[in-house]
Image (cartoon, helix red, strand yellow):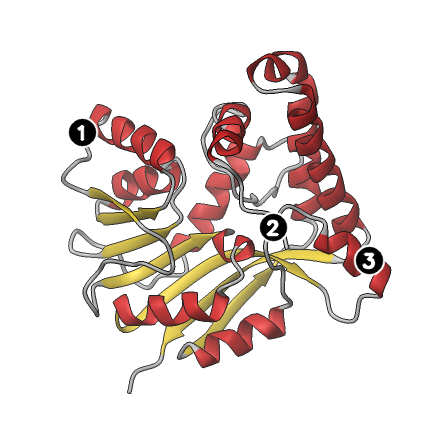
């Protein structure tokens, strides 16, 4: 299991990732065209998720879990003209998000709340839809997460999330490499389905796009290398090299078929 990042490590990560590719998204993107940037691909992921919801209007309330720098939240609030709640446990990211919200005058549409899956300070039956962009991949509390979402979601509400997944029946050597990745707990698609059932959700749709995972991390590694000298000045050589190695490891495991990525849609079961 990966160690919990310290505050200084989080600050370094934010320095490295934010705005390197023209946006603040950190999740895997849909690279339908090979020349797409990580920013463009991440936006394509958000657009594809939105298409899985039956109807969005001014009264629709959407919760984005581990909302990061808030790029998806601001885009959704503007493009869909709806209400968006951001739940995130990083004060630096939340401050950045709030400043951007103020700048583009979205304060009446977006609310930021400090919290996590273990503390979701919302009343039951609050949200129509919930979105999580790769945040299931970095928590070892997946069943807890499903149950927490179930509580705050309206009857027959929908949950859509993207996730990096490990494949079934990998040998010990490959699994050892997977466990070295800087994420808490990667699981298989069947395990997600089981955890969702225990959390009172039914899967109704899935989109498997395994090939986009190595593409994403290859592009991130290229960007990190291209900016390596400046990034080392802002953090440290060891820290930047660790991030590049992580991208290379994700790429290799994706190309070998040990890891996959996709978008999963679930509906709340009532009663």
Nearest to viewer (mark 1 / mark 2) = 2
Tell me the residue that label 2 is attached to.
183
- Residue 67: image location, x then y, percent: 38, 44
10 Å crowding of disc 3: few (<14), some (14-19), many (20+):
few
- Residue 106: image location, x then y, percent: 20, 34
Q: Is residue 257 shown to the viewer in this render?
A: no
The C terminus: image quadrant: bottom left
Mark 3 lies on a secondary structure that is helix
Mark toward the start of the polypeptide (3 vs 1): 1
- Residue 32: image location, x then y, percent: 61, 43
Depth check: give the residue in front, 79 or 115: 115
Q: Residue furthest bottom?
A: 271
Left or right of 157? Residue 236 is: right
In the image, what residue occupies the spot 75% across and 43% down?
Answer: 249
Mark 2 lies on a secondary structure that is loop
Mark toward the start of the polypeptide (2 vs 3): 3
Mark 1 lies on a secondary structure that is loop
The N terminus: image quadrant: bottom right
């Amino acid at each position: 299991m990966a160690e919990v990042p310290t505050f200084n490590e989080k600050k370094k990560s934010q320095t490295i990732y934010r705005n390197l590719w023209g946006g603040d998204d950190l999740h895997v993107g849909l690279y339908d065209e090979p020349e797409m940037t990580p920013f463009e691909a991440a936006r394509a992921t958000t657009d594809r998720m939105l298409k899985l919801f039956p109807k969005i209007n001014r009264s629709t309330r959407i919760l984005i879990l581990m909302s990061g720098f808030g790029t998806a939240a601001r885009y959704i609030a503007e493009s869909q003209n709806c209400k968006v709640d951001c739940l995130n446990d990083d004060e630096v990211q939340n401050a950045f998000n709030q400043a951007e919200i103020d700048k583009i005058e979205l304060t009446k549409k977006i609310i930021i709340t400090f919290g996590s899956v273990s503390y979701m300070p919302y009343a039951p039956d609050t949200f129509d839809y919930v979105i999580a962009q790769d945040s299931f991949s970095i928590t070892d509390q997946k069943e807890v997460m499903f149950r927490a979402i179930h509580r705050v979601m309206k009857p027959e509400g929908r949950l859509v999330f993207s996730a990096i997944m490990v494949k079934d029946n990998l040998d010990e050597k490959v699994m050892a490499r997977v466990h070295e990745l800087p994420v808490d707990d990667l699981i298989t698609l069947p395990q997600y389905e089981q955890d969702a059932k225990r959390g009172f959700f039914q899967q109704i749709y899935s989109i498997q796009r395994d090939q986009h995972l190595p593409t994403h991390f290859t592009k991130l590694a290229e960007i990190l290398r291209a900016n390596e000298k400046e990034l080392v000045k802002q953090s440290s050589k060891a820290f930047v090299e660790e991030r590049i190695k992580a991208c290379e490891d994700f790429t290799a495991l994706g190309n070998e078929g040990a890891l996959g990525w996709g978008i999963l849609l679930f509906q709340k079961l009532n009663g």
